[in-house]
Amino acid sequence: MHPILVEVFGLQIASYGLFMILGAVAAWFLIRLLAGADGKENGDISLVFLICVCGALAGAFTLRPLMKIPEVIIHWEHFRQMPVDVFFSYMFGEIVFYGGLIGGIVAMLLFCGRYKIPAVPIADLFAPALAAAHSVGRIGCFLGGCCYGIPVRAAHPFAVTFPPASMGAPAGTPILATQLIEAAGLLMIAAILVLVYKKTASRINGLTVSLYAALYSVLRFVLEFYRGDLARGIYGPFSTSQYISLALFIVSAALIFMIAKKRKHPL
């Protein structure tokens, strides 16, 4: 694992941040490729993409602090004794994918609504790229040592051991490489969505993005049982991400059902 991957002019670039950037670049190239093949190349797509990125960054840094507010209120006596820098690091030191997803969706809907841009066809176009970008980002998680899995036997085929310099994974303990498993799953989802988009984009609005939400919510819900980083929030039997996954799956399944029902012929 390499938490610090590159050093340029004395500036250390964390692997996590680097792979976030690489993921965004990969997403942009895939969007341009699909948009060109579908005849949708225009300035609206570029602008909406930038708006989504900004919204995603805001949401990714916001969701975790919002989820920590009840804990801070309940244990205020403990938190009020923390140094200010430690408290802010605890509250804002993590980014959350689902927060980024929600932020990106909200930003896109607000922007498209304000300027009368059809949001659903663009969401279909962005869905395969989002899955691909997320896959690249998870490699950054692996290199940095965050989002790690539960302890497993050293002989387990997906066992990895992190060094002391990782971002949180227990050093020297064989744990499940959930980051790489999720990256592989997301890459498969991206491939499926590309095929679906190419086949249906000109005829069926909303199918590709709904299928993305359904497939990823299932993948994430299952993988959460094998995550070992308890800081992500556990409430009752499930984690925060599992509750969001359940809601996302219900909504996406309903949308797919509605789309199928409107079609005169089977998909």
Image (spheres, helix red, strand yellow):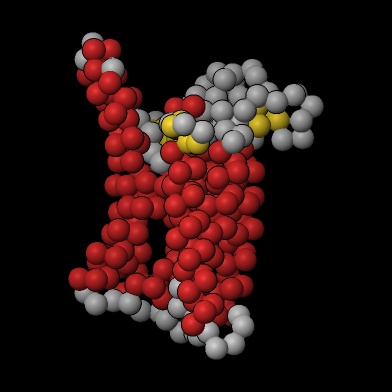
Asked if residue 25 lies left or right of residue 186, the reply is: left
Q: Residue at x 23, y 12 (%)?
A: 77
Quadrant holding the N terminus: top right
Residue at 48% x, 74% y is: 258
Q: Looking at the picture, how far across and down is residue 120, in whole percent?
A: 39, 73
The residue at 41%/68% (across/down) is: 123
Q: Is residue 239 above or below residue 260?
A: above
- From this viewpoint, is residue 50 visible? no
Q: Position of residue 31 (x, y in %)?
A: 47, 69
Residue 228 lies in what quarter of the image?
top right
Which quarter of the figure has residue 264?
bottom right
Work out whether residue 222 can be spotted.
Answer: yes
Residue 232, percent from left and from top? 45, 32
- Please state the total of marks drawn on the protein image: 0
Residue at the (44%, 52%) spot, across then down: 247
Relative image position of residue 48 (x, y in whole percent):
32, 67
In the rendered view, would you say 138 is above or below 69? below
Image: 120 above or below 79: below
Relative horizontal placement of residue 12, taking residue 113 as reference (left or right): right
The C terminus sits in image quarter:
bottom right
Q: Residue furthest right?
A: 155
Asked whether, in this view, residue 231 is left or right of residue 2, the answer is left
In-image side of 146 versus 109 (left or right): right
